Image (spheres, grey):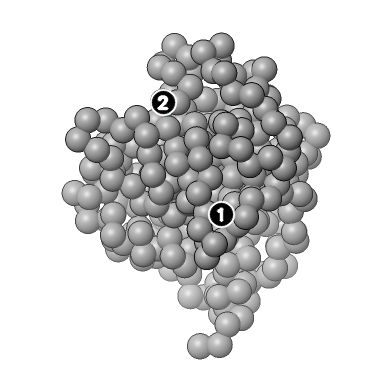
């Protein structure tokens, strides 16, 4: 099932017991907004093997979040074990996968994905996909949390990297476009959820008129799930996870980071802490 997402839901509070559980980890603390009634803490890991992890870290530190966020740069399993959520940055997906295998992180992240939210940006989006086309010779290891097929460098080579304004209805101040930076970006070429998978929610599509001229995507009706139409999808969610084919961390706009914490991370914390032990 595929659905286009409307406005986001309100976040829930994290009980003090949860804050106690996550406190005391070495990491970097992002600022807490005064509106938070309790010193709730959420621990977000950033896979820091290659690529734009430092930019995600800076953005999370500056982001206007309603919770205190402890940031953990994840390089080994014991870092991952501290995290409530994980961001996989852009960079080079084959290299990140190789380094993750060498660090013994591929299987732990696959396990992590089953219960905790993960956000993949660009190369991270490739890793989060269930299958990939255009992989380097020798293949490409994936994590596979989201049931889509994605095409590496699907908009073309470096010279066809581009920037474009995106409409994203679920972000705060939704009438202000989000500046999408696409660098050798992957393209969503198929949505393949099985009947038992959570539904895929489309968060943003790029207007076909803004795509590089080499692209021939034809925008169809909003509800049409024709695979051709998937090429205009640039942000989507499935279950706990978020995928963006562009780089929000390379902008000065914190709204995607705020969205991930508010919509993907905090609801899982509150549901975990309210479920019976
Ligand atoms: N900006 C990026 O993350 C590019 C992704 C890169 N094309 C890859 O395949 O991994």
As drawn, is 261 to the left or to the right of 87? right
Instruction: Find residue 146 and report its horizontal and vertical position in percent.
Output: 48, 51
**Front residue of this view, candidates 187 and 55:** 187
Q: Which mark is residue 153?
A: 2
**Front residue of this view, candidates 164 and 40:** 164
Q: Determine the residue positioned at 75% across, 61% down.
A: 10
In the figure, 249 relative to 199: above or below? above
Instruction: Find residue 160 and report its horizontal and vertical position in percent.
Output: 48, 14
Q: Quadrant of residue 145?
A: bottom left
Q: In which quarter of the image is residue 92?
A: top left
Mark 2 CB lies closer than 8 A to ligand 1: yes
Q: Identify the mark nearer the N-term, 1 or 2.
A: 2
Q: Determine the residue positioned at 57% across, 18% down.
A: 216
Dot 2 lies on which element?
loop
**Which residue is identified by label 1?**
238
Q: Can residue 153 be seen in this view?
A: yes
Q: Can residue 92 be seen in this view?
A: no
Outermost residue to the bottom? 277
């Amino acid at each position: 099932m595929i659905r286009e997402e409307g406005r986001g839901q309100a976040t829930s509070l994290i009980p003090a017991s949860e804050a106690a559980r996550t406190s005391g980890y070495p990491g970097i603390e992002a600022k807490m907004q005064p509106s938070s009634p309790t010193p709730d803490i959420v621990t977000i890991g950033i896979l820091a093997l290659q690529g734009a992890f430092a930019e995600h870290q800076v953005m999370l530190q500056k982001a206007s979040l309603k919770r205190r966020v402890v940031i953990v740069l994840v390089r080994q399993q014991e870092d991952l074990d501290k995290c409530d959520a994980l961001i996989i940055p852009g960079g080079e997906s084959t290299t990140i996968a190789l380094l993750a295998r060498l660090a013994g992180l591929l299987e732990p992240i696959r396990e992590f994905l089953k219960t905790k939210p993960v956000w993949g940006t660009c190369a991270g989006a490739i890793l989060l996909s269930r299958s990939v086309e255009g992989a380097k010779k020798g293949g490409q290891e994936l994590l596979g949390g989201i049931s889509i097929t994605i095409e590496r460098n699907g908009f073309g080579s470096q010279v066809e990297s581009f920037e474009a304004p995106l409409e994203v209805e679920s972000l705060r101040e939704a009438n202000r476009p989000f500046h999408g930076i696409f660098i050798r970006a992957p393209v969503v070429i198929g949505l393949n959820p099985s009947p038992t998978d959570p539904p895929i929610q489309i968060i943003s599509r790029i207007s076909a008129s803004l795509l590089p001229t080499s692209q021939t995507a034809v925008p169809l009706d909003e509800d049409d799930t024709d695979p051709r139409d998937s090429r205009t999808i640039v942000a989507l969610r499935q279950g706990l996870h978020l995928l963006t084919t562009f780089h929000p961390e390379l902008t000065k706009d914190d709204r995607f980071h705020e969205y991930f914490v508010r919509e993907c991370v905090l609801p899982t914390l509150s549901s975990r802490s309210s479920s019976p032990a």
